[in-house]
Amino acid sequence: MLNGVVGYQILEDGTPVSLGLILFSSLLIFVGTGYIALDTGFSWTGFWNSTLVEPNKAYALYTLYQLVPIVLLVVYYLLEAYLVLRVLGERRPMCMFHNRFHWMHY
């Protein structure tokens, strides 16, 4: 998602700050998800033991592993679509899927 923000040139792309923000946010999600998954699976602290009994509802793990990436992907697509359609004024990049998959309409 931060890559979509970089397209607006709020931060210059390729600078240590923009690369650091992307790396830091990626590591934050990776470490958070990894910790919850490992602690749930191996019961290191016992904090997540309630998720091990039936019906196994690990909401924290589900949120970080499934929902956060899906939400960030949708936000990225919306940021890029706005950038292409409004800021750049181009429609052809958005029609790529229409031209490539035109056979699906038959």
Image (cartoon, rainbow, N blue to C red):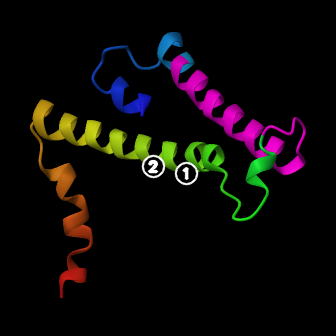
Q: Is residue 15 visible?
A: no
Dots 1, 2 in contact, CB < 8 A? yes
Whether residue 92 is visible to the viewer of this picture, yes or no, is: yes
**Rendered image quadrant of residue 1:** top left
The answer to whether residue 69 is left or right of residue 5 is: right
Check disc 2 and give the amino acid type: Ile
- Report the front residue among 78 and 39: 39
User: Could you say whether the residue bearing mark 1 is in a helix, strand or loop?
Assistant: helix
Q: Looking at the rendering, which quadrant does residue 25 occupy?
A: top right
Residues in magenta, as a range? 21-47
Q: How far apart, in angstroms, are the residues tagged by discs 1 and 2?
A: 6 Å
Q: Quadrant of the C terminus?
A: bottom left
Residue 32 percent location from the top left of the image: 68, 33
Q: Is residue 16 above or below residue 60?
A: above
In this figure, which residue is indicated by the disc labeled 2? 70
Q: Position of residue 44 (x, y in %)?
A: 90, 38
Label 2 SS: helix
Which class describes the residues within 10 Å of circle 1: few (<14), some (14-19), or many (20+)? few
Question: Looking at numbered disc 1 in the image, what kind of residue is underneath it?
Answer: Gln
Which disc number belongs to residue 66? 1
